[in-house]
Amino acid sequence: MSRDGGAGAPGVDPQQLWLASDRPRRGRPPAYSREAITAAAVALADAEGLEAVTMRKVAARAGAGVMSLYSYAPDKETLLELMVDHVSGELATTDTPTGDWRADLKAIAHLQRALMLRHRWLPAVLATRRVPGPNTLAFLENALAALRPTGLDGTAKLEVFAQLTAFVAGHVAHEIAQAAASQSPERAAAEARYLAAVAADGRHPELAEALSAPGRPLTPEATFTRFLNRLIDGLDTD
């Protein structure tokens, strides 16, 4: 991967990224910090989307020279790792688990959803992040503590957390796409007419029955909660 994220850059070394000092080892004292550079990248992604995050644009937003950024993030891959962990610091990690692990997992999922809606680039990035930083690890620690009453072994707990995060990321990505598509009332009305016609053609009795069922709240929050409840309540801890 190139310095702007193209193919060819080596993978991120987690020890070098998270355990080594973030200060340049040579030269004058730095005029910027890794935190400031990362915050500038997050603000850029929030405002213009992930595709706008290039080293040059981040440098301009931070008021730094492009070359100075490479002391903190040698390529876009590293910068994305920093961005994910930076926003993960917004997740609450001080709440003591209640002992009701299903309720605690649902609360964790709602926190994740809120974070991803604030930073709409996050679901796409999470699919390829594999180097949890300190903020991400703190949130993971909280989730593992919530799962202690299940009696699951360590691997299974990690799998449950990964499954939950993947569900939230996928749902939020769909939610964002649906919100963008539904901005056209004409399109929504056309889709409703199409489904009504299909349901009435006699060839799709199961669909007709499903569409005739009593309606449920269709707000994004209500829909997410229903889907989440099905996932968590159906988890097998045997």
Image (cartoon, rainbow, N blue to C red):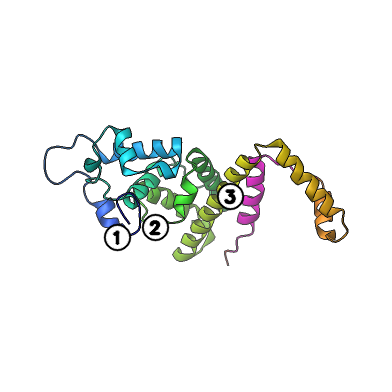
Question: Which residue occupies the foreground of this view, 37 or 154?
Answer: 37
User: What residue is rendered at 80% in x and 45% in y?
Assistant: 193
The image quarter in which residue 189 lies: top right
User: What residue is rendered at 63% in x and 44% in y?
Assistant: 178
Q: Earlier in the sequence, mark 1 or mark 3?
A: 1
Q: Earlier in the sequence, mark 1 or mark 2?
A: 1
Q: Earlier in the sequence, mark 3 or mark 2?
A: 2
Q: What separation in Å lies between label 3 and label 2 (alpha carbons)?
A: 20 Å
Q: Which residue is mark 1?
A: 10
User: What residue is rendered at 49% in x and 62% in y?
Assistant: 159
Q: Which residue is mark 3?
A: 171
> Residue 77 in the image: x percent, y percent?
34, 52
Q: Which residue is mark 2?
A: 130
For the stretch drawn in magenta, the main secondary structure is: helix
Magenta region, residue range: 215-236
Q: What separation in Å lies between label 1 and label 3 (alpha carbons)?
A: 31 Å
User: What residue is rendered at 12% in x and 38% in y?
Assistant: 28
Magenta region includes residue 111? no
Is residue 93 visible in the rendered structure shown here? no
Q: Quadrant of the C terminus?
A: bottom right
